[in-house]
Amino acid sequence: MTSYRQPGVVLTDRRFTVPLDHGDPGGEQIEVYGREAVAAGRAGGELPWLVYLEGGPGFGARRFVGAQAWLGRAVREFRVLLLDQRGTGLSTPANRQTLPLRGGPREQADYLAHFRSDAIVRDCELIRQRLTGGAPWTVLGQSFGGFCAVRYLSSAPEGLAAVLITGGLPSLDAHADDVYRAAYPRVERKVAAHYARYPQDVERARAIAGYLAEHRPESAGHRLTPELFQSLGHMLGGGNGSHQLHHILENAFVRTPHGTELSDTFQEALRSATSFAGHPLYALIHEAIYGQGERATGWSAERVRAQFPQFDAESALAGDGPLLFTGETIHPWHFEVDPALRPLRETAELLAGRTDWPVLYDPERLAANEVPVAAAVYHDDMYVDTEHALRTAAAIRGLRSWVTNEYEHDGVRASGPRVLDRLLALVRDEV
């Protein structure tokens, strides 16, 4: 272990060996990394543990500098473990560079089938035993981290002192089709709100999409298409996302000796905002996190989009209506336009066709839950359907929900101390 200091905290790098397949504990092992954070001056003290599970899937835990955001509030009373879930960050990463070590696409897909919330929770249980000596700990789950927390309540509640969830209550039984069928109308409302705020962006977006359709430029190996441009809509689910999207659009065109062209500034912004180089697992297993039972996800977001023709870029450009941005959806074309994903196209196809996903949630166990649970449900959340979330909240015995439109999906990042304070008060019956 290596320990070091940042403003207000002492950090320790921790690495754990866990089975790739928890059903075969003596088989292949992988490494999971966690960064311990404790308040300066309390490193040697006895403190309860809190483990943070990041949103995603496919993102390592946030890299704070010192006691930033909610971490500053958490270390006032907890020893915090910022966990890089398997395959992310420093935890035996899974990407186009490393996955060929597994073999071909079939072997890669079989490997990645072990990277969902069920395996993440079993990793947590092994790590908890090693860190706490068996004492239960508190889980803070953001977005997909909340999905993992509900799996935790379903499979190993004995390991939990309390559960705090921010924007991450999954449907217990919805297929991916149900998730995206509910998502597209929410995204459309967010796009309408953006255009109401920035009406000048309506024509800008149409002009950009038209240019991309005609010229199909490339930037650092990325094929810039109208559909890729539409995917900038994922930004609209964050507190500042609409403003950030506007700033990208306003830099779109420059005059050159050859006429008006897309600016390098815009092309770089589009490439960096849509690249999966830093989180390829998000694209590879995003729909798999909804897989339960024998029904394949089958490129759900792509199939369901056909039910919402207003999102079709070609049709929008042929008419005079606004171009609609899309949201948190993964499509087959992502594996054609992004060089970080291109070598993994067949692997993604095999995952999309998989029909042997274990069931993730146990409604009977959740109905008998005895672990204190509090969940922030963001009323206007673009990423997690509010109706689905509230049904799940009602299905978990004793869960106290805080429904608010004060924050967007990234509320724990934007105003983390306030959100964490409220959830802790709820699980302690102080509100």
Image (tube, rainbow, N blue to C red):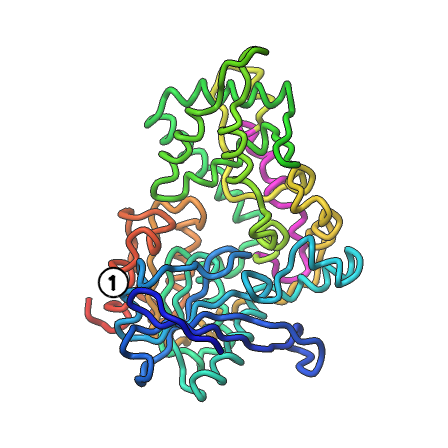
The magenta span reads 290-311
* Residue plotted at (27% across, 66% down): 73
Q: Estimate the x, y position of residue 106 in percent, counting from the top left.
A: 78, 58
Count residues near mark 1 (Cα–Cα under 10 Å), then give few for <14, some for 14-19, many for 20+. some
Q: Estimate the x, y position of residue 45 in percent, counting from the top left.
A: 30, 84
Q: Name the residue carrying label 1.
A: 422
Q: Is residue 170 left or right of residue 41?
A: right
In-front residue for pair 73/367: 73
In-front residue for pair 175/157: 157
Q: Is residue 63 visible?
A: yes
Q: Quadrant of residue 92?
A: bottom right
* Residue plotted at (38% across, 44% down): 238
* 408 over 18 or under it: above or below: above
Q: Estimate the x, y position of residue 311 in percent, counting from the top left.
A: 54, 30
* 119 over 211 or under it: above or below: below
* Residue plotted at (40% across, 51% down): 387
Q: Is residue 61 magenta?
A: no
